[in-house]
Image (spheres, coloured by chain):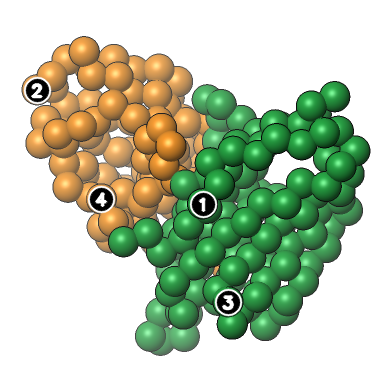
Amino acid sequence: DGGITQSPKYLFRKEGQNVTLSCEQNLNHDAMYWYRQDPGQGLRLIYYSQIVNDFQKGDIAEGYSVSREKKESFPLTVTSAQKNPTAFYLCASRLSRTEQFFGPGTRLTVL
Amino acid sequence: DQQVKQNSPSLSVQEGRISILNCDYTNSMFDYFLWYKKYPAEGPTFLISISSIKDKNEDGRFTVFLNKSAKHLSLHIVPSQPGDSAVYFCAASEINAGGTSYGKLTFGQGTILTVHP
């Protein structure tokens, strides 16, 4: 079945450590996105990529980095520079001009 | 600055009645609007959308209304069912200066809908 896989579902990190969240899609979509969700807030865009080897900052890119070496993969690294990394992270790919298809998410907790 | 706002954090309705979820936006460049439904610890799923050239779009029990002059849209669910209980997000897509879209979505804060049996 086609879809988006995010792993792990739950991730714990010590302060000062970098951590990488995985996002893989087999939908053959060109564009991929990373969002962050905090309690009581909507989804906020971190980074997005329209094509392989190209990506742009979203609204809250500070403290995060991404790569897009393959069409299927768009990993997100949460660096130690991110001051408040505990959140629910969602990866999406672009189905059409407007609709985005979301993965199941990764809950990151900083201990 | 919150460009898409859902001012009601929660809504509670009785099964069989109508649920109306509201959304306001400030950016005049938004030209497409979507509603997503989300369960806890899961990714959002697409529900329904509307282009700015329309004022209504219907899909089964779900209807979205757009009032461009008021920069307001609403989602109507009729009849509401207990399985509709979830968080509903309004989202908007913007055309860039070149007349295309990067597919970036701006989301509201969400409204928690609870449908009681």
Pointer 2: what residue?
Answer: A16
Q: Chain of mark 1?
A: B
Judge whether A86 appears above or below A93 on screen.
Answer: above
Give the foreground label among 2 and 3: 3
Pointer 1: what residue?
Answer: B7
Give the foreground label among 4 and 3: 3
Residue type at mark 1? Answer: Asn
Residue type at mark 4? Answer: Ile
Question: Where residue A60 is drawn, which disc sits there?
Answer: 4
Q: CB atoms at circles 1 and 4 under 8 Å apart?
A: no
Judge whether A110 appears above or below B104 on screen.
Answer: above
Q: Chain of mark 2?
A: A
Residue type at mark 2? Answer: Gly
Q: Mark 2 packing: few (<14 Cα in 10 Å), some, or many (20+)?
A: few
Chain B appears in which tint?
green
Q: CB atoms at circles 4 and 3 under 8 Å apart?
A: no
Q: Quadrant of the N terminus of chain A?
A: top right
Residue B94: in sight, yes or no? no
Pointer 3: what residue?
Answer: B70
